[in-house]
Amino acid sequence: MSSWDRFVDSFFNARVAWEYLPRIIDGFWLTILLALSIIASGLAAGLILAVLRSFGLRPLNWLIVFLVDLFRALPPLVIIALLYFGLPAAGLSLSGFAATWLSLSLVLMAFAEEIFWAGITATPRGQWEAARSTGLSFLQTLGWVVLPQAVRMVIPPLTNRTIAITKGTALGSVVAVSEILGAAQAGVSFSFNPTPLTLGALAYVVLFVPVVILGRWIETRFAWKR
Amino acid sequence: MTLDDFLLAFFSLDILREAWPILWQGLQQTLLLSVIVVPLGILGGTILALLSTVEHPLVRWPLMAWVDFFRALPPLVLLIFLYAGLPFAGLEISALGAVAIGFFLNTGAYYGEILRAGIESVPRGQMEAARSTGLGRGQALAHVILPQAVRNVLPDLISNTLEVVKLTSIASVVALPELLFQARQAQSVTYNATPIVAAAVIYFLLLWPVVRLLSRLENRQLAARQ
C-alpha cells in the first residue's frame, strides 16, 4: 500500500465513516442544543447584570464588576474542571452537560454584561434626559429608549464573542459529554482509525463556517460609524 | 455538610502545602507555553495580515477560506486532530509540537483578522505618501502602516493575547503538564478539590490585571468614539 493509500485509508475510510456517522450526527445535535442553551442563558444573564448595574448601587456594582472580571480571567476549561471534578467534594454532582453549560454560560454572561454595559454608557445622556422629561420612568426609559439603541450598537462585538464562546462546547468532551468531539474521540478509540475525527472536524466546519461568515457580515452591516 | 467540611474539601491549607510543588511546576509550564505560543500566533497573524494587503483574487479567496476555516474549528478539535490523528499518518508528534502547531494555526487566524482590521484602519494616503518618499512597499508596510495599525487595534490585540494565555489550559487534554493538568493530577491523588481551586486562584491573580487594563482601554476607546 502506498503512503497515499494509507493516508486515505486512515483519514477518509468510507467503511469507518459510514459506521460512525450516526454517532457524529447525534453529537452534532447535542452540540447545537448545548450551544443554544449557553447562548440563551449567557446573554440573558449578561443583560440582567448590565441592567442591574445601571441602577448605580455602589456595592452591587462592585460585585458585578468582580464577577465579570472573574469569569473573564478564568479559562473556561478550568471552570468546567472546578464544577465537574471539584463540586462532588461538596456532595454536589453535576453531569458533564450541566457543568459545561453552566461554565460557558457564566463566561458568556461576563463578556455580554461588559458589552451591554458599554452600549448603555455609550448612549448619549441627552437620550436619558429627553425620555425622562416626557414622563417615562427610569425603567421605561431604559427598556424603551436606551436598550434598543445600546443593543443595536453592540451587536457586532456581541456576535463575535458569542461565536467564540459557543465553540467552547468542544470542551465538553473533556467531561464526557458526547457532543461532536466526544463522539468522534470515542469513535477513534473503538475503530482504531482517525476517520471519525475527520468527520467531527467536518461537522464543526459545517456548523461554524456559516456562523463565522454571518458574524463577518453583521460586523460590516452594523459597523460603528466613524 | 458543615462549613468545616466545606473548607476542608475546597480550601485545605494542608493539601495546598502538599500540592504546591506540583502546582508551581504547572504554573512555570503555563508561562513557558504562553511565551512560546503567543509569539507563534502573532507571527502567523502578521503573515496573514500582510498577505491580506495583496488584492489578487488568487491570494484573497484562499486566504479568506483559510482564516474562516481555522476560526470555525474549535481549537481543542484542532489540537486533538493533530495529537491523536497524525500518528495514524505515520507522523508521531509530541504534545508540545501539537500545541505549537495548533496555536500557530488557530490563534494566528484571530491575530490575522485583528491586524487586518488595523491595516485597513490606516488611511490609504499613508501608503501613497510613504511610497512617494521613495520607500519600497515592504518598507512602507513595516515602518509606516504596521506601527499605526498595531496602535489602532491594541486593545483587541491584548484581549486576544489574554484569550490565548487562557487557552493554553487545553494543553492539559494532551497531557502537557501545565497548571490545569498538574492541578487535576494533584486533585486525583489527594481526593480533594483544593488543588483545582488553587489553580483557579492562580489564573485569576495572574490575569486579573490584564482584564482590568482591558476594561480601561475599552472604555477609553468607547469614549473616543462618542
Image (spheres, rainbow, N blue to C red):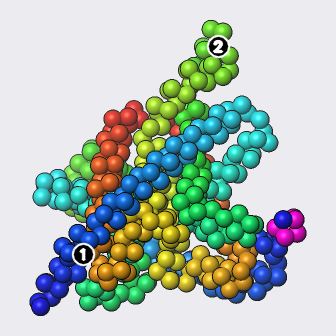
The residues bearing labels 1 and 2 have C-alpha atoms spaced at a distance of: 64 Å
Which residue type does callout 1 highlight?
Val
| Farthest-out residue, top | A134
Residue B180 lies within the magenta run: no
**Badge 1 sits on which subunit?**
A
Residues marked 1 and 2 touching at CB (< 8 Å)? no
Judge whether A136 appears above or below B163 on screen. above
Could you confirm whether marks 1 and 2 are on the same chain? yes
**Badge 2 sits on which subunit?**
A
Q: Quadrant of residue B186?
A: bottom right
Q: Which residue is mark 2?
A: A136
Q: Quadrant of residue B145?
A: bottom left
Q: Position of residue B197 (x, y in %)?
A: 70, 70
Judge whether B24 appears above or below A204 on screen. below
Q: Secondary structure at mark 2?
A: loop
* Quadrant placement of the N terminus of chain B: bottom right
Q: Position of residue B163 (x, y in %)?
A: 50, 62
Which residue type does callout 2 highlight?
Leu
In the visual, does B165 lie left or right of A51?
left
* Numbered circle sitting on residue A16: 1
In the visual, does A30 lie left or right of B65?
right
A191 vs A223, nearest the viewer = A191
Q: Is residue B107 visible?
A: no
In the visual, does A81 lie left or right of A162?
right
Q: Earlier in the sequence, mark 1 or mark 2?
A: 1
Q: Residues within 10 Å of mark 2 (few under 14, many from 20)?
A: some
Judge whether A74 appears above or below A159 on screen. below
A83 vs A77, nearest the viewer = A83
Q: Position of residue A222 (x, y in %)?
A: 38, 34
Task: Give me the residue at 28% from left, 56% from top.
Answer: A206
Task: Give me the residue at 63% from left, 37% from top.
Answer: A48
Q: Which residues are magenta?
A: B2-6
